[in-house]
Image (tube, grey):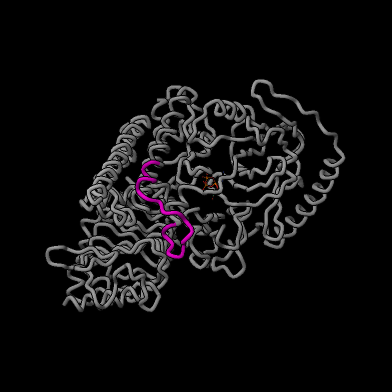
Amino acid sequence: EEELVRNALLEFISKLSNTNGYLDPTWGWNSSSYPCKDKWRGIICDNEHFHVNKIMLEGYNFSGVLDARILCNVQSLSESLMAIGVTNNNIHGENLEDIGNCSKLAYLLIGGNQFSGELPVSVSRLINLKILNVSYNEFSGSLPDLSQISGLTVFQAQDNQFSGPILDIDFSTFSYFNVSYNNLTGPIPDGAKRFKESSFIYNPQLCGAPLPKNCTKTSLDSKAEPVPGDSIPPPKSIPDGAKLFKESSFIYNPQLCGVPLPKNCTKTSLDSEAEPVPGDSIPPPKPKNGGVSKDQILMFAGYILIGLAILSIILLWLYKKGKTKEEKIDTDNKVAAVDDSNRSFSTVELKGRTEFSTASAESGIASSSLIVLTSPEVNGLKFEDLLQAPAELIGRGKHGSVYKVECGKAQGMSLAVKRIRDWTLSTNEFKQRMRRLDQVNHRNVLPVVAFYSSRIEKLIVYEYQQNGSLFKLIHAQEHPGNLTSPPFDWSTRLSAAAKIADALAFMHEQLLHDRIPHGNLKSSNIFFNKNMEPCVSEYGLMYVDNQDLQQSIDFPTSKNTLQSSSKELDHNILFKADTYAFGVILLELLTGRMVLNDGLDLASWVVAVLREEWTVEVFDRKLIREGASEERMVNVLQVAIKCVNKSPEARPSMKQVALAIRVIRDDDERSMDVSELSMTRSFANLL
Ligand SMILES: Nc1ncnc2c1ncn2[C@@H]1O[C@H](COP(=O)(O)OP(=O)(O)OP(=O)(O)O)[C@@H](O)[C@H]1O
């Protein structure tokens, strides 16, 4: 029997990894060993009977196929197998209908892959399922019938192409349910109304609470004319985390844009009326009778483009000829300021590279300046210097784009210029905020070097951090081919967490009365400076207000839209979205997993696994292999779980969190000292 299981697993991994059976020998998978006795990587067994319980091969970038027949048609294996976890690879499925034979499965985790076609009906027979994650794939057809699976707690099906209605089943056992970004139709069943709006968004024909769209007769009628702009969901840029994957992971998604796809998320492509790329499968919405035809639209667009080109030439000419305005000294902020009215940043695509240029100009009403804050290296830096320096687009986030600028005036310093999108703070409010932030310094918070604010453009200049972000450090390791990234061991992770927590606690304390939390904390906004010290970037750039506060209760992150702020808002609660975000960072450090869906997926996955008392399962295998102290990892996990509590009031303050992490870090350092000491002693004994 053991041999049958071994052979099945070897065949399974050979197809999954697409390497004709070749695997890193340190994984232990070979025909002269046994999966349980020899502890093959990714195999978790029942140690009493040596039965394979779980196959956990998540985030290894495998690009082959998951053949369910191989696993589920070997009786001794299918009878013991409780979990198949292959999320975040690049795999397809084969013989998926045989998954129904793995009847003991409690965890089927295949999200973040390239599965396509219909989800097999046999999934509905997996009545022991507790977590079903099929999200971020290309599944189509109807959602599985979950009515027989009475113990299901988590169902993740977001970002697929599922169509048809959501069946009205008993949702009372579910702690998480997400079917957003599909093509589902009809009303949301009553039982599912308790989930948040984010669980359903971007299903153009879904209606009813919690979505804002009412189920009118028309929206219930599947043959009804689609509402213009509704039939094609707005294009989505590929999240930063997913940019590590190959282009092939994203192709044939007409509405997806950004790196690694060749299709840029330009304003037009992010505009819901963007033209689909030729060959894309979704036809453009038909003009209604009496509406404007496509030809007419093209004609008008042509006129507008010609008009804009002429206007740009005139303005460029005026700019070159224009008088140089006098520099004025901003005394209260030890800054050099240049009046840059009549100019704005704009980008032009130049053979695939993006450069700043002065090609467009503001209407001439706004008056704006580049404010250079105290930084000896860039003293005297002017807005023109930035405009003239070559700039390279290095990434686009939710709130704007970042350019790397090599500016001679910055004495060899490379700059990262963040261009903030959609920020509705007035120029004065923005300046006030930047000046206030400039007064609060912490060694683990990246200082703003300069900023620029006009009515339509807000730029923040940072020093470019070439050691990369925490996000890259955690996730670069997942790619087997990546030999360049330094090891990110437990003590480095713990020390980074302690420093980040200290920095946030300090900033919160200093900026409590100014009501300025970070507002957009995540691992991609934490950089390692030249001394490999973690530095929190973008502190306070996002405006968190009353509405955001409500949102932070529903969702962990905040929006940057400015609404009327309310004085009675509890200051402490305002900062609790940062606590949540810090908790997600802790989970990322502990699990090595990607954060999707603003951390909700990671948090609910961890909570669900812990509920099953699989504590060790959640930890990054690299940490386990390294021999990191399980006890201290569990301690950090407990802090993280408190931080991601759904109720903001129940979350600890960053001051409390910082203290807790510091205690664990000190304990860890002491234990290393002790083990070093005992090693020295034993060496001494040998001498
Ligand atoms: N100071 C910096 N030094 C080096 N790289 C940077 C710097 N600031 C940003 N980047 C890089 O630029 C890219 C885009 O950053 P950006 O902050 O826009 O994205 P994000 O953090 O994913 O989204 P958001 O808009 O929500 O902050 C990221 O890859 C980030 O690592």
Residue 490 image offset from top left, x and y in percent: 35, 48
Q: Please give the range of residues in magenta.
A: 477-495
Main SS, magenta residues: loop
**Residue under the image location 59 percent in, 40 percent down:** 462
Q: Nearer the viewer, residue 500 or 202?
A: 500
Q: Nearer the viewer, residue 639 or 606?
A: 639
Q: Nearer the viewer, residue 105 or 643?
A: 643
Which picture quadrant has residue 429?
Answer: top right
Residue 199 image offset from top left, x and y in percent: 39, 50
Residue 613 image offset from top left, x and y in percent: 20, 51
- Relative to 220, residue 412 above or below: above
- 301 left or right of 624 in image: right
Which picture quadrant has residue 625?
Answer: bottom left
Residue farthest to the left, as pictured: 48
- 528 left or right of 637 in image: right
Residue 57 visible? The answer is: yes
Residue 150 image offset from top left, x and y in percent: 21, 57
Residue farthest to the front, as pictured: 687
**Residue under the image location 15 percent in, 63 percent down:** 47
Residue 265 sits inside the magenta stretch: no
- Relative to 431, residue 139 above or below: below
Q: Nearer the viewer, residue 45 or 311?
A: 45
Residue 486 sits inside the magenta stretch: yes
- Relative to 364, residue 135 above or below: below
Residue farthest to the right, as pictured: 321
Position of the N terminus by quadrant: bottom left
Residue 163 visible? The answer is: no
Q: How many marks?
A: 0
